[in-house]
Amino acid sequence: MKTIEETKAAIEAAVPGAGVEIVPNPSVSGQHSLRLAPGHAVAVATFLRDRLSFDYLSNVTGVDWPDKEVTEKVKGTRTATKTVDGVESTLEETVEETRKRVLPGWLEAVYHLYSVALKQGPLVIRMRTVNRTDQVELPSLTPVWRSAEFQEREIFDLFGIVFTGHPDLRRLLMWNNFKDHPMRRDYVEPDDFEYEPTAHNEVLKRAQAHKSRE
Amino acid sequence: MAVADNKTDKPEGWNRPPVMEPDGEGELLEVAMGPHHPSTHGVFRMDVALDGERVIRLKPVFGYLHRNHEKLAEGMSYLGSMPFTDRLDYICPLTNNWAYALAVEKLTGQEVPERAEYLRVILGELTRFQNHASSIGFLIQEMGASGTPLMYAFREREKILDLFEMLTGARMMVNYMRFGGCRVDASAAWLDAARKVVAGLPGFADEMDRLLSGNEILMARTQGVGVLRSELAVNAGVTGPMLRASGVNYDIRKVDGYGIYNRFNFRVPLGDHWDVYDRYMIRLLEMRESIKILEQALKDIPAGPVMDPKAKLRGFRPKPGEAYGRIEAPKGELGFYLISDGGPNPYRYRIRPPSLINLTVLEDMALGENVADVVLIFGSVDIVLGEVDR
């Protein structure tokens, strides 16, 4: 089996400007992955299927990487005037400042490929969306591997990645007029799915609390 | 695009189900088969459009049993998800345990003691046997042969479930495997009981074979029905007995050789007509291969511990990283994909359900067939809704 570096070189030779990056995996499983640029993903996938015999797409899944707030300490200098024993002197002081910065998050789709013909694998490929809110499109690989059909629908349903070029992109598990994406890490469960008050005291109380919040 | 010159001999859209037009003058009849229908193995719906008796469109509808098991797992420890895996494919809880344990062992690099590996193989193959037996029973039941084959299968399954209960304390919700071994050791009495049950299994396989394989009605109803071509089966990610019935030699027990499967001598049966009858026959033949593995494993099982002594059950925190582990479950490739961020809970926990992905080709197999055959084609896929909806 080709190493991940050889696979990357083969892809870059076949699809110029594919922008493939190796994502190392620090765990002992040693399953490193390739990150594809979404613009070339379908071309790369076709190449992987037809030329490198990765004819079987086993697993497709989404991962949510939410926005991260990082606190970093920045060292700066400032000039301060100090009076020591009646003599004024100017000093340079180093000051530590704590700043907060928000790193934007993204949604990720992960594909595990195997080769039935050569009995090899897995090759892990992944793609990222630009952000988690309005630019959540990724190219669909269902035209290349049919097994992605239901799994991409599931990701669309639970994570909210929109797969362009998918032949039948609908919710898979949740009902049609459900609004949110439950597998996102910041998903908040509604306190009650049914607003009808019942005779049961606790449910009645929760329903009232819910109504007053609206 | 640079790969535009890579021509395959297949036209674009070859792996999609064809669009069928009604040919009669009558109106189309839309039927919702399910969610409450005796043949749907649980709450599952097929929206079927019929032109007379002929199926011209079929859309499966999922989600009636959805409980977002993957989200629940993100909120609990790694070990906490183990009992929940029993509830995925509740016909074969032990292989679900095994797949999850294998994925975590891939993530952490834990070793499994030899006796535990043998126990896993014994339990895995017993599970495969009873799954295939009851799946054949269900298939014949749905054909209209009400009762007999299914009850025969359940009689044999009960003996195997008794073994599970003796060892793990539960017939179905076993919660038996751990990361780095198994929860409890099997006593000598249990191994003797298992040998006794396994000695009776070939007789059962012969009985099913004599009862069903040459049955005229079974052959008339299943031969040439629901044909699945091998290129489409591979492209659509079909695995397990269905893939092998389509003539593709791909058994993860042979390909990955996970556990200690490369020590055993067994064959991989393949179909060459790719129809429902082949799927029935492959399951029957795989039952016989399972008996072979069971006999070898029960003969060679060594003494020793069943748990890695270095395994940590409390405060279990794998190093950051990810792993995908898969096994040949009775229904197909069952995989677990885990991402660890170094915490006590998995950051991402994903199940690759063979039942759901094998249903991708349901429409392709059913188009153009009679509506009565849809039930058979669906039965030959062998699904469990606990795993489809998760």
Image (cartoon, rainbow, N blue to C red):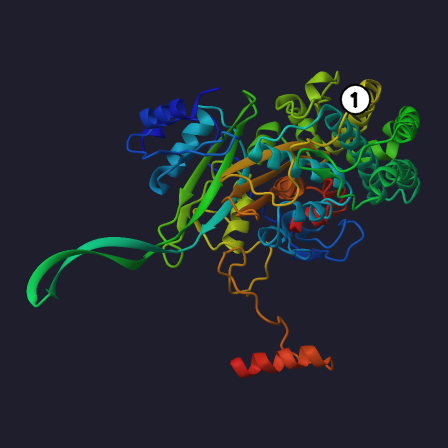
Identity of the residue drawn at 50% across and 56% down: A184
Image quadrant in which you'd find residue B377: top right
Which residue position is annotated with label 1?
B293
Image quadrant in which you'd find residue A196: bottom right
Give x and y (percent) for residue B301: 80, 21
Give x and y (percent) for residue B179: 66, 36
Q: Looking at the picture, which amino acid does disc 1 mark?
A: Ile
Within-10-Å neighbours for mark 1: few <14, some 14–19, many 20+ = many
Left or right, B71 with reference to B120: left
Q: Look at the picture and state if B14 lies above or below A99.
A: above
Depth order, front residue of B20/B294: B294
Q: Is residue B210 visible?
A: no
Quadrant of the drawing holding the N terminus of chain B: top left
Depth order, front residue of B247/A64: A64
Q: Look at the picture and state if B363 lies above or below A94.
A: above
Depth order, front residue of B63/B294: B294
Looking at the image, which residue sits at the far front? A85
Identity of the residue drawn at 57% across and 78% down: A210
Q: Is residue B122 visible?
A: yes
Left or right, B118 with reference to B359: right
Give x and y (percent) for residue A56: 54, 31
Left or right, B352 with reference to B381: left
Image quadrant in which you'd find residue B126: top right
Q: Look at the picture and state if A195 lies above or below B353.
A: below
Identity of the residue drawn at 43% across and 39% down: A126
Give x and y (percent) for residue B161: 86, 39
Subunit that carries the residue with mark 1? B
Identity of the residue drawn at 57% across and 28% down: B231
Q: How many marks?
A: 1
Secondary structure beneath dot 1 equals helix
